Image (tube, rainbow, N blue to C red):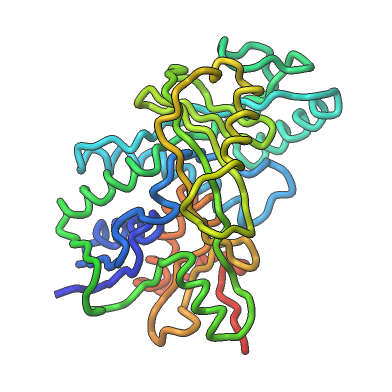
Amino acid sequence: MVDFTVRGAGIIGLMMAWTLIQRGFRVQVIDPYGAGAGASGGIVGALAPHMPEKWGPKKQFQFESLQLCEALWPEIDAVSGLSSGYGRVGRLQPLQNERGIALAHEREAGAQIHWGSYAQWTVVDQVPDWVPASPTGQWVYDTLSARINPAAAVASLVRALQIKGCLIYTEGDHKGTVIWATGVHDLARISQAFGQFYGAGEKGQGAILYINLGATPQLYSDNIHIIPHENGTTAVGSTTERYFDDPATTDELLDDLLQRACDVVPALRGASVLTRWANQRPRSHTRAPILGHHPIETGAYIANGGFKIGLAMAPKMAQVLADYIIDGVDTIPQDFVPNFAK
């Protein structure tokens, strides 16, 4: 007997299954491509917050989801016996000029309002040795950012679900209430059904380097994420490509990204490239997640569109949609509600 069928074994679908299992329901997951086959099986894993300014429901939602991560991933890892690589290590960003310093102090005040005592956004002048020099001698350091190893997180979550009795299939019949979390594939078929664009995949490329920078904060500079992982490797990512021929191949755009990363952090020069990775991430037409009733599957629900922030958003997305389906409690932000009309 199954109470819920979750279609899609990316991070949002798997987290949806975990949330339902923890509430005592019987769940099966179906994904013809296997767990973490898309963007969720990636390598970068920057759980970074939105800037603490121009605050709104999406930023509040992400903030609350990042808070959930801190207890959630250790809990999942304890059940699975595996490591997701989660760590709330913070993030550094070099300040390029006096205007950047002034803006950073404005955002510091915003963080005090919106983040409260949970996390800080501060201007610092002391950083780890590997971090590149700042033109101003100052950096932003936020204590809210975390890192995770996406592929390892998927593996830990899959194992924890199996231990809890949730089976993951590549095919099978729908049983119970169905939740669609199939990312790019669902956005494409919804667009086709309504004859207008409601979302698509955007490609990202990244790499894992064999260099251990230690247990230090991640770095964001020149639009590049540099993430020292728990396992002694360092992730570099990622490109953002709206137009591409093959979503799963790496090319000269990644080569350029790696060169720029080495220019930003000279310590990376000469490090071996262990993994080159590419795939597409689901981007809704509003750039916000999609939560609620499925627009073309009668009686079903949808959880989709975690563009670039799916790993950070998944815990709260699963919690809120479960509240809505099970208890009829609607706390879904209005911007997330599917708005499809022919």
Q: In this view of the protein, which residue sits in the foreground, 70 or 225?
A: 225
Relative to residue 166, is residue 77 depicted above or below? above
The structure residue drawn at horizontal position 53% and vertical position 33%, both measured from the top left corner, is: 236
| Of the pair 329 and 206, the residue shown nearer to us | 206
* Total marks in image: 0
Residue found 19% across the figure and 73% down from its top: 2
Identify the residue at horizontal 41%, vertical 36% (top origin): 275
Q: Position of residue 272 (x, y in %)?
A: 44, 23
Apparent side of residue 230 relative to residue 268 in the rendered image (left or right) = left
Residue 172, image quadrant:
bottom left
Residue 216 horizontal/vertical position (percent):
49, 20
In-image side of 220 versus 64 (left or right) = right
Q: Is residue 313 left or right of residue 178?
A: right
Task: Mark yes or no: residue 117 visible.
Answer: no
Residue drawn at point x = 51 percent, y = 65 percent:
331
Taking depth in this image into account, of 303 and 59 the one nearest to the observer is 303
The quadrant in which the C terminus is found is bottom right
Q: Quadrant of residue 243?
A: bottom right
Q: Is residue 14 above or below residue 214?
A: below
Q: Residue 311 in the image: state x and y as whole percent.
A: 45, 48
| Pick the front one: 225 or 243 | 243
